[in-house]
């Protein structure tokens, strides 16, 4: 708990004067691009893969009329 007390007592210096609005705008633009790349390259493909399993199971059930309950553990 002593480390948290020291952290609470630590003063944070103000941002430097030369950090202007243009730097903020460039940084924000880069962060938005990186977040969108992460979304489109990692999150959406993972969601699509996870969603295809129940959709394919639905179509298989619709065609065959049987529901195979196989639990796969990862």
Image (spheres, helix red, strand yellow):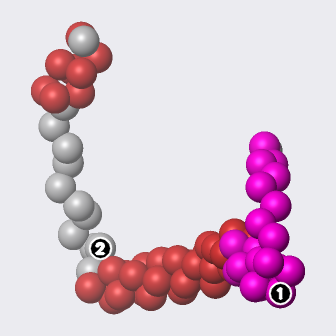
Tell me if I can see residue 64 in this picture.
yes
Q: Residue drawn at (86%, 80%), measured in percent from left and top?
A: 64
Say which of 60 and 20 sits in front: 60
Q: Determine whether label 2 and label 1 are within 8 Å by CB.
A: no
Q: Which mark is residue 19?
A: 2
According to the image, label 1 marks what residue? 63
Secondary structure under badge 1? helix
Disc 2 residue crowd, few under 14, some 14–19, many 20+, Cα 10 Å: few
Is the residue 2 above or below the residue 65 in the image?
Answer: above
Is the residue 38 above or below the residue 32 in the image?
Answer: above
Say which of 69 and 72 sits in front: 69
Tell me if I can see residue 52 in this picture.
no
* 11 with respect to 69 (left or right): left
Q: Position of residue 12 (x, y in %)?
A: 20, 44
Q: Residue drawn at (77%, 66%), measured in percent from left and top?
A: 67
Q: Residue drawn at (28%, 17%), measured in percent from left and top?
A: 3
Magenta part of the protein: which range? 54-73
Q: Is residue 72 magenta?
A: yes
Count of residue discs: 2
Q: Residue 24 sits in which quadrant?
A: bottom left
Mark 2 or mark 1: which comes first in sequence? Answer: 2
Disc 1 residue crowd, few under 14, some 14–19, many 20+, Cα 10 Å: few
């Amino acid at each position: 708990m002593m480390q948290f007390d020291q952290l609470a007592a630590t003063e944070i210096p103000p941002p430097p004067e030369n950090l202007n609005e243009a730097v903020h705008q460039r940084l924000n633009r880069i962060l938005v691009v990186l977040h969108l790349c992460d979304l489109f390259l990692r999150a959406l493909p993972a969601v699509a893969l996870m969603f295809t399993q129940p959709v394919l199971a639905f179509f298989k059930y619709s065609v065959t009329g049987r529901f195979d309950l196989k639990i796969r553990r990862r």
